[in-house]
Image (cartoon, grey):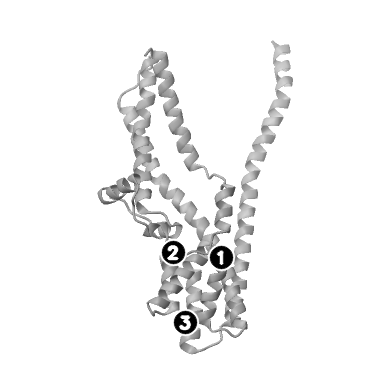
């Protein structure tokens, strides 16, 4: 293999790795097919992905790495998204290995081009890039978990409205919770269905099960639902007005958060617009400046 071919192959491999890293960092648009499938899920009860046994090869490797690699797992976010810890650890290790080995590919290309580079430079760059790649899955998981919690808040607001409608019809709070949860097909409703069914089978208290679910998923809104159930169960109080007011306040909070996010996006768009205006003005003034220099010379 001649030097030119080696340089081209090394550059192609390094460029493909960088493109893969950038594609993982940038948020991608959701596909229409899976999104529609989530909206129209069949009424079947499915266990979260963390409860399924690891049978594939990459899950087995991830399980081995989980016991060997010292990593602080964000179990709350993983449980919220239904992602197995083995897959998370495997992605961290693979990205870190790519960050450590990527500079060596470019070192071979630079050496063939006759560029003299000290051997410690790729090592330092590899360590820095490996450290960055180590935290990339955590940042992505945190971003997805924030989106999932916002989606959960919307789902719980609808759930509270459904519970209030059944309370207004004279249904007991225990039956109202189960009937309202059986209406929805989103992942929030499925989690609530599983929790209430487990509490009924184990003869536990519904409010305690809902509060535990909210703590496990990091969704504090479920704790409010648990407080309503506890108030109605222990004190026998009517919680219809309380549930309606909490649902209304939750919708108001969501609208305020969406308005703040929209304002922040509008402010971020001002900087690219200003840069674009400067570039257009520079392009318009460039011929005049070039003519002025030509005349003076």
In this picture, residue 256 sits left or right of residue 58: right
Q: Which residue is mark 2?
A: 217
Q: Which residue is mark 1?
A: 155
Callout 1 crowding tier (Cα within 10 Å): few <14, some 14–19, many ≥20: some
Residue placed farthest to the bottom in the image? 236
Marks 3 and 2 in Cβ contact (< 8 Å)? no
Whether residue 68 is visible: yes
In this picture, residue 163 sits left or right of residue 44: right
Q: Which residue is mark 3?
A: 230
Name which residue lies at 30% across and 45% down.
61
Callout 2 crowding tier (Cα within 10 Å): few <14, some 14–19, many ≥20: some
Point out the tag, 3 or 2, that comes first from the N-terminus. 2
Point out the tag, 1 or 3, that comes first from the N-terminus. 1
In this picture, residue 153 sits left or right of residue 81: right
Secondary structure under the numbered disc 3 in the rendered image: helix
Name which residue lies at 58% across and 58% down.
39
Secondary structure under the numbered disc 2 in the rendered image: helix
Quadrant position of the C terminus in the picture: top right
Instruction: Identify whether 113 is placed above or below 104.
Output: above
Quadrant position of the N terminus in the picture: top left
């Amino acid at each position: 293999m001649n030097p030119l071919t080696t340089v081209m192959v090394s550059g192609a491999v390094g460029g493909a790795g960088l493109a893969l890293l950038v594609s993982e960092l940038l948020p991608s648009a959701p596909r229409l097919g899976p999104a529609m499938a989530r909206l129209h899920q069949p009424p079947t009860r499915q266990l979260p992905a963390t409860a399924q046994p690891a049978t594939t090869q990459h899950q087995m490797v991830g399980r081995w790495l989980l016991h060997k690699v010292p990593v602080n797992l964000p179990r709350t976010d993983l449980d919220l998204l239904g992602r197995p810890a083995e897959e998370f650890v495997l992605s961290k290790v693979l990205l870190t290995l790519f960050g450590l080995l990527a500079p060596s590919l470019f070192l071979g290309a630079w050496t063939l081009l006759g560029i003299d580079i000290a051997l410690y430079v790729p090592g330092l760059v590899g360590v820095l890039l490996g450290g960055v790649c180590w935290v990339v899955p955590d940042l992505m998981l945190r971003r997805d978990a924030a989106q999932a919690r916002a989606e959960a808040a919307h789902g719980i607001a609808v759930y509270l409205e459904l519970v209030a409608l059944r309370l207004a019809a004279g249904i007991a709070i225990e039956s109202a919770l189960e009937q309202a949860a059986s209406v929805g097909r989103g992942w929030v409703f499925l989690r609530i269905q599983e929790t209430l069914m487990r509490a009924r089978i184990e003869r536990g208290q519904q409010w305690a099960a809902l509060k535990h679910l909210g703590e496990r998923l990091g969704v504090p809104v479920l704790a409010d639902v648990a407080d309503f159930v506890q108030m109605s169960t222990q004190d026998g109080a009517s919680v219809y007005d309380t549930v309606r007011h909490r649902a209304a306040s939750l919708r108001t909070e969501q609208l305020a958060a969406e308005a703040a996010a929209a304002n922040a996006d509008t402010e971020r768009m001002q900087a690219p617009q200003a840069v674009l205006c400067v570039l257009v003005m520079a392009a318009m003034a460039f011929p005049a400046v070039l003519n002025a220099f030509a005349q003076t010379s």
